[in-house]
Amino acid sequence: MTTPHFFQIADINQARAAAGKRYREFLRIPAMSAGLYALAKGATDPQKPHKEDELYYVIRGRARMRINSEEQSVQAGTVIFVEAHADHRFFDITEDLEVLVFFAPAETE
């Protein structure tokens, strides 16, 4: 099977919602993995530190993001880098949040 090259956010989000999950991975190669993460307004983000570096791109919504002791408001268009093992999470989610997430190397379970 070949790795797909093109993806539609709407399709990924529909599959994520149909599975009843917050996160839907849509790409996995050894060097990286990518997924769509969604949190509803007022939700609690249950993330724990990961072994991989992460890059987030906020597609829509508004919230705050904490990385270790640093906090900042995020919204559509915000790009966020989280180094491996850093404590991080979204909070004060004031609008439904959709975020592209890229792990390098690919996320481990």
Image: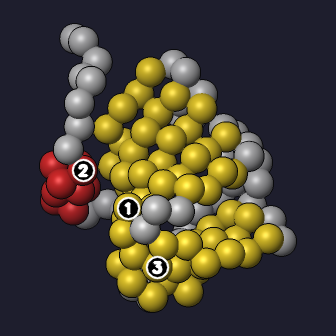
Quadrant of the frame with the N terminus: top left
Image point 55% across, 21% down: which residue? 31
Q: Is residue 22 above or below residue 28?
A: below
| Residue ranking furthest to the front | 77
Image point 16% across, 49% down: which residue? 11
Nearest to the observer: residue 18 or residue 89: 89
Which residue is the site of mark 1? 59
**Distance from the alpha carbon under mark 1 to that under mark 3:** 10 Å
Image point 52% across, 79% down: which residue? 63
Q: Quadrant of residue 34?
A: top left
Q: Quadrant of residue 21?
A: bottom left
Q: Position of residue 42 (x, y in %)?
A: 44, 88
Q: Amino acid at mark 2?
A: Ile
Horizontal arrangement in the rendering, residue 44 relative to residue 65 (left or right): left
Which residue is the site of mark 2? 9
Which residue is the site of mark 3? 62
Q: Say if mark 1 contacts mark 2, CB within 8 Å.
A: yes
The scheme the figure's colours follow is secondary structure
Image point 44% across, 21% down: which residue? 29
Q: Say if mark 3 contacts mark 2, CB within 8 Å.
A: no
| Residue ranking furthest to the right | 69
| Residue ranking furthest to the top | 1
